[in-house]
Image (cartoon, helix red, strand yellow):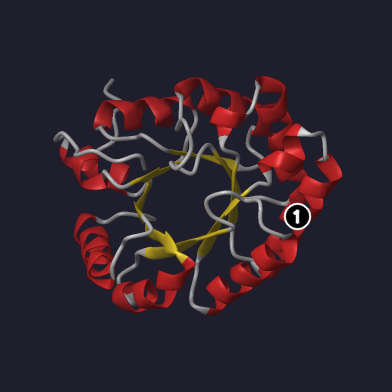
Amino acid sequence: MNNTPSPSTLARTIDHTLLKPEATSGAIETLCAEAVAHGFYSVCVNSSRAAQARDLIAGTGVKLAVVTGFPLGAMCTAAKAHETALAVGDGADEIDTVLNVGYLVEGGSEEVLADLRAVIAAAAGCPVKVIFETCLLNEEQKRLACAISLEAGAAFVKTSTGFSSGGATVEDVRLMKACVGDRCEVKASGGIRDRKTALAMIAAGATRLGTSAGIAIVSATDAGSGAY
């Protein structure tokens, strides 16, 4: 039996993403038009572009995901929570926020938990995806990040921002899925540029993919260069 998802089913796993600092309003317009045309689950944008994207996808069924504390996760908790609240006010359906990696690697579990809880509270019921930046963590730290994210109430754990030294790997997705089980979902992001890679991430346990190469993935053509 062929268990490979159809292009339309695969499209519904994709957060069509544009997070480059040089992204213009015209580029956001293109992103949103592509998401609608190809039936992607959402567009994922920086918070300064949230209201524009909201208006462009209104009534289409495409969701709006907004990143906060991006890409470092190292800003103060109050700032991350405030940005999250503003994003929700601008129409975000989902929030992708970056875990404070420095807190985690120095053993500050309570600080990480408090940081995530503040963001999740500010999200006011919108699902929150917690980005780990897995390339900066060892296995023990990845497991701890999963446990803290679950305790904080995350809807997803997510591999990467696409802006650090590495992106999603099948091994990390498999590990994260094993840690969270059915208690939350796993989003793979960073370096997913073709259908083969996308399908490998899904087979490992990811239910959502963050990528700027969604069109190439669903049409099985080669993507251009880019980290996310």
Residue drawn at point x = 82 percent, y = 34 percent? 107
Position of residue 144 relative to residue 1, above or below, is below
What residue sits right under mark 1 in the picture?
115
> Quadrant where the C terminus lies?
top left
Q: Is 142 on the left or on the right of 209, as rendered? A: right
How crowded is the residue under tag 1: few (<14 C-alpha within 10 Å), some, or many (20+)? many
Near-viewer residue (200 or 140): 140
Q: Tell me which amino acid carries mark 1.
A: Asp
Position of residue 45 relative to residue 73, above or below, is below
Question: Hey, which quadrant is residue 83 in on the image?
Answer: bottom right
Question: Hey, which quadrant is residue 108 in on the image?
Answer: top right
Q: Is 96 on the left or on the right of 23, as rendered? A: right
Position of residue 160 relative to residue 113, above or below, is above
Near-viewer residue (205 or 1): 205
Residue 93 position, x and y percent, is: 50, 66
Residue drawn at point x = 64 percent, y = 32 percent? 181
Residue 45 position, x and y percent, is: 41, 61
